[in-house]
Amino acid sequence: MPHAEPWLERAPLLLRDAVNALLPAPARWWVDSFLDIAVLLGVFGLLFAFLTLAERKVLGRIQNRPGPNRAGWGGVLQPFADGIKMLTKEDIVPRLADPILHFAAPVALVAFSLMSFAVIPYGRHLLALDMDSGVLYFFAAGASSELAVFMAGWSGRNKYSLLAAMRALAQLISYELPLLLSFVPVVMISGSLSPSAIVTAQGGWHLGFIPRWNVLTPWGFAGFAIFMVASLAESNRSPFDLPEAESELIAGHLTEYSGFKYALFFMAEYFGMCALGGMAVTLFLGGWQAPCAFLGFIPSYAWFGAKLLALLLGFIWIRATLPRLRIDQLTRFAWKFLVPLALVNLVTVGFWHLSASWSRGFDPLRWAIAIALVVIPFVAMGRRLSAGLGPRTYRFAAQ
Amino acid sequence: MIEASTDALLPSPGSRVRPVRDPFHGDLLEVSMGPHHPSTHGVFRMVATLDGETIVRLKPVFGYLHRNHEKLGESTTYLASMPYTDRLDYLCSMTNNWAYALAVERLIGQPVPERAEYVRVILAELTRLLNHTCLAGFLLQDCGASGTPLMYAFREREKILDLFESLSGSRMMCNYQRFGGCRVDPGAHWLAAASRVTEGYGRFLDEFEALLTGNEIMMARTQGVGPLSAKLAVAAGVTGPMLRAAGVAYDIRKVDGYGIYPRFNFRVPLGEHGDTYDRYMLRILEMRESIPILRQALAEIPAGPIMDPKARLRGLRPKAGESYGRIEGPKGEIGFYLVSDGTPNPYRYRVRPPSLINLTILEDLCLGRTIADAVIILGSVDIVLGEVDR
């Protein structure tokens, strides 16, 4: 019943129809595609700009300082000042660098991270490409971005960059697996690899007020947690920012980059964050669905944006707080904790799927078993992971 | 791809370290970390030879900040060296001043008035708070904590620097101690301000510790990393919190009882493992012990002159002889050795720099660890290059 929807909800459709009405039929497909790309680039380009500002402001507040506040009112023009600065800086290519790879790495990185935006449903009627295997496409595009990091590290002919490239590869191989395993439960339950179908499957409410989002089930919560940790690692964010570990490797794979190429890496990092955050919203947080029925009058893309921004704020908060892992701890955490936990989660979701036919009276038992399947491996493996670590007591010298 | 300079750093005969160029096992990677690297805390260089990311050899290179401090001390008068001592460990100018003043006072047999002794204790303990706060902040920064602990540490450091500035006129280069007392008298206002800082410090430490001390990642990064055995520490002459983290009870405030320290009741915390976590915690515990010392000193400080009226600063010509003045600086034993031949300038002026001597064991701590570990081990050693290079 699209006619019953408020016009704000239908705004993207109205815009498309208005444009299409002006065009001859053969040009429509091309113009529509171009429009999709332009909107994605524009919206996420602006989001990137203001996300850098938000990150610096939030970090500043957390760190007891004001953050950038000189350019424009409260610093709102800071991203543009940064952009101008980056564009006007000298673009240095080291003499011994591989010039083709050195140039291709940032471009490839941005391209790969932009590709993932195509399949995320931003609203009820806002989806660039409704692919049946959209989720697979998304993770394939995301995984290629680590290759670009490796290219950047290799091409600079800098020892720090090379070390960073090795770390990036180790990280890619380790964290791609839990990332992929963590969304398999969602696919198993919703029976589709299409992001829009996954969002639709999360519509409606339990008992009339609890949203049927995946995150509000035991397996969904575990999957969400694993997904978020792995996506922190995939987007090279603290505490997994080993490839560009500032205090160890100067700037890691970015060491030999300057000017706008350097800015492109940051653009790709924020795009990656947005894309992974958007996919987390789609897979686990109900996508563009409103949390309560009576809030349905707010357009779906506003809900999507709010959820995405909340996740991004979480990313920033984590960056401001946590120290960085060491490379061996990083891989150990992935292989000995996240991957087994994600595998156990597959069992949990299998049980959840089978027990869906139990009568309502068994619901508490169903929940208890599912929670136990999630919590017990978590606690057991977590204890093994942190064995031998802990606070210490100290003695004092005899007077 | 990567060319390593091989000839200069071939292992010495008898060494079991693999050569950098090794066609059989594969080449090692030689990384020169510094002199401008974000985590070397100044112009310090570590030539690290890596097998993968594991350090198989690490050669500290320093001297970039060398400025002939000791020779300058021999060509100027005793008093004129006092401002130079500020520049040794530029975080702890007050304790440097005190150690130098102590050496000269011992050389000429100069007594110090009671009030000045109290002021010296107050300033030394404030310096300890300042230094350890900075160290803890920088260490967590080296662990990758994105500046938050460092910013909180610097907020508190600023309060102490304000105290120093209002007392001596300078935030870091205080030039405050004199032979036979202190340069100016801290008024009642200053003492009240120092009291306020002292009283607020415990709360800050709680806040700071709540942030990351119990954090899993922090413990995983620091526990068991770079353990220093008591034997090696003593053999290498390591002093200060690093030595005590290795479990050796040696605090010059207790051993020498210089100044009026025997009047104060404080405990000396000891570590057990000597690893980076112990070194970090020792600093936190020492700060907690400094607070009661400060509280007691601020409560008991008597009225009276701040300088011995008979003290002679200008035209000082000590009799021929020698003296060694040492105190427990925040980084370890900071000492000045003076030889006088009866002229206005010292015949020999020698600094015992705790940073340099604590740094000598860096390679022993880092071998077999990764680059990330080397960075935090260096951070936990607590060096200031002004003092290492002199």
Image (cartoon, helix red, strand yellow):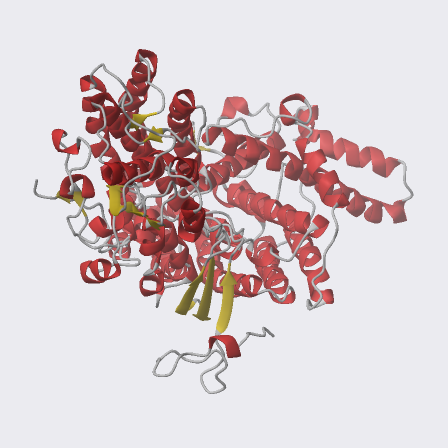
B43 sits left or right of B99 in the view:
right
* Residue with the most extreme bottom position: B24
Q: Residue furthest right?
A: A24
Above or below residue A26? Residue A208 is above
Residue found at x 60% / y 59%: A149
- Quarter of the image containing the N terminus of chain B? bottom right
Q: Quadrant of residue B126?
A: top left
Q: Which residue occupies the foreground of this view, B39 or B350?
A: B350
User: Measured from the top left, where is residue A348 in percent x and y?
Assistant: 34, 52
Nearer to me, A94 or B381: B381
* Residue A167, placed above or below residue B3: above
The residue depicted at 50 percent of the width and 50 percent of the height is B38
Point out residue B342 in the picture as x, y percentages from the top left corner.
Answer: 32, 44
Q: Look at 19% across and 27% down and name the residue there.
A: B292
Q: Is residue A166 above or below residue B325?
A: below
Q: Of B316 and A305, which appears nearest the observer?
A: B316
Residue A251 makes an appearance in the image: yes
Q: Left or right of B275: which side holds A208?
A: right
Q: Residue furthest left?
A: A398
Residue in view at x 22 percent, y 45 percent: A391
- Hey, which quadrant is residue B128 in on the image? top left
Question: Where is residue B15 drawn, in percent x and y?
Answer: 35, 80
- Please tell me which residue lies in front, A237 or B269: B269
